[in-house]
Amino acid sequence: MSKSCFFTGHRIIKITDTLSERLRETLIEFIENGATDFYAGGAIGWDMLCENTVLQLKKCYPNIKLHLILPCPPEEQTSRWSMPQKNEYYRILKAADSVETLSAAYHKDCMKIRNSRLVDLGDICVCYYNEQHRYGGTYQTVHMAQERGKDICNLFRY
């Protein structure tokens, strides 16, 4: 039976060659064990690294799919982002296999709703989570995943 993966992680991360390669190796392992669907929330930082990695892996594994689960419309999600971040976001959005927008407009709970939807859709949480941070969206999503019995693969140490 194929498994699906979802991503959650901090927005501010240090992307190193070691981290990028470990993420790639992890996703290849999941793909070779049947994972075909990858769900991401469209945030900067970890989400974008994961989304780009899935898009790169599609060249070797054309059966895999990247699904974006957005908390609100793109123009609202990116309203405070830099132009390079917006350009990257829209490039990924265009390349994704599907896009689901959960709220018609930004509101205080739209990120939490997005995080819950990610947990609902995926079997394996591939995260970049500093366990010393007991607050924020990444903590909330990992905690929800643990409560719902999802497998957790934390790449924070890389």
Image (spheres, grey):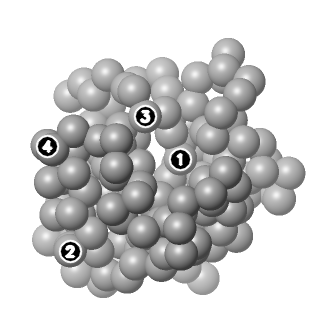
Drawn side of residue 148 relative to residue 25, left or right: right
Q: Residue furthest top?
A: 132
Count of marks overlaid on the render:
4
Task: Give the percent coordinates (x, y) of residue 158.
Answer: 40, 24
Amino acid type shown at disc 1? Thr
Q: Quadrant of residue 36?
A: bottom left
Amino acid of disc 3: Arg
How far apart marks 1 and 2 lie (CA) works out to 21 Å
Task: Rate crowding at label 3 as few (under 14), some (14 to 19) or many (20 or more) other CA atoms within 10 Å.
Answer: some
For label 2, the SS is helix
Indicate the amino acid at tag 4: Pro
The quadrant where residue 87 appears? bottom left
Between marks 3 and 4 in the image, the one whose residue lies nearer the viewer: 4
Element under disc 3: loop
Real-space Cα separation, disc 1 to disc 3, in angstroms: 9 Å
Report helix, strand or loop for mark 4.
helix
Q: Residue 84, percent across and down?
A: 14, 43
Q: Residues within 10 Å of mark 4 (few under 14, many from 20)?
A: few
Q: Residue at x 27, y 28 (%)?
A: 15
Given contact means CB atoms under 8 Å apart, are the residues at marks 4 and 2 in contact? Answer: no
Instruction: Give the label on residue 11, or none.
Output: 3
Which residue position is annotated with label 1? 8
